[in-house]
Amino acid sequence: MTEERHINNLDTSIRNREEKRCTLVGMTSDVCLSALKIVTGFVGHSSAILADGIHSISDTVTDGLVYAMVRLSGKGVDERYRYGRGKFETLAAFLISIILVVVALGLMSEGVKDVWAAFQGETLERPHNIALIVGIIAVIVKEGLYHYTRLKGHKTNSSALKAYAWHHRADALSTAATLLGVAGAMFLGERWRVLDPIAAIAVSVLILVLAYRLGRPAVEELLEVALPREEQDKISSIVTSTEGVKAFHNLRTRRNGNLRVVDIHVKVDGDLTVARSHDITRDIEKRLSEALGEVMTNIHVEPYHGHNICEKNGNHTTQ
């Protein structure tokens, strides 16, 4: 049996350095925005901006979580973590999705209470102009962080950074809803101040959808769900088309952060030398790495006895 890890063109240490730099940028921005919003909420008499500032404090907690997970995942393979620490990134993505759910439910609860209060005749105090200005600045900064982090996430193929990018987008949308309510309170009169909680409810639903999109693949990876059917078919095609391979079975696949793990039994001519059999497995590993990116393969070689058994997704087929 052979076990090798093939790294794609982007060096792991460079990828981890990019992740840490990106997280630090987000962390610094979130700390500054939180302080600015809270001060503005008090000075500008805007409960919406104040609440958004308090909500932004949770972003710094998320930032610290992502940074810690990225540092851990970058330590690579050692005696304790033989498959590396890629699932620390997956865990970070899952925890971010949980935070998004909690934040969304909190926004929805507050929005419903404010809508009910408005229907009961309660009105909100008109915010000062500074609240509107700070809200606009916050939306621009958070949307910029979303695009920056998303770009870095795709460049490094980091699940944690991709999830982190959507967290920035959710914050931008949340602040935009708050900004809409502030603008309505300032320019449309008392009766339209209910736009603030209504917009907050709508955005909270969107955040729940984003949390689901982030959390589901993270949960599937933590539960070691097999790779998508397209990737399994690609693996099957590569293995069967490799010179010297007569058949294969017991194909098992999963993800480990940025790493795809492939376990497989291949059948070769029983008269081949050990060296030639090893060359065949190396050829398979190289071709899988070229097609899929970062791959760890565990290949067990067996002699071929004249019948062809293939296993795809747990189903045996005799040819």
Image: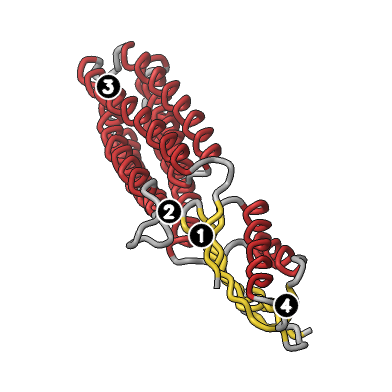
Disc nearer the start of the sequence (1/4) = 4
**Place of residue 97 in the rendered image (x, y in percent of width and height, measured from the top left):** 40, 49
Disc nearer the start of the sequence (2/1) = 2
**Place of residue 18 in the rendered image (x, y in percent of width and height, measured from the top left):** 44, 34
Q: Quarter of the image containing the N terminus?
A: bottom right
Q: Residues within 10 Å of mark 4 (few under 14, many from 20)?
A: many
What residue is pinned by disc 3? 46
**Is residue 175 visible in this depiction of the protein?**
yes
Give me the C-alpha separation between circle 4 and circle 3.
69 Å
Viewer-nearest of labels 1 and 3? 1
Give me the C-alpha separation between circle 4 and circle 2.
31 Å
Secondary structure at badge 3 equals loop
What residue is pinned by disc 4? 247
Disc nearer the start of the sequence (1/3) = 3
Viewer-nearest of labels 1 and 4? 4
Give me the C-alpha separation between circle 1 and circle 3.
46 Å
Q: Quadrant of residue 267?
A: bottom right
Viewer-nearest of labels 4 and 3? 4
Tell me which colouring the rendered structure shows.
Answer: secondary structure
Identify which residue is drawn at 39% across, 17% down. 137
**Place of residue 307 in the rendered image (x, y in percent of width and height, measured from the top left):** 76, 87
The label on residue 255 is 1
The label on residue 86 is 2
Viewer-nearest of labels 4 and 2? 4
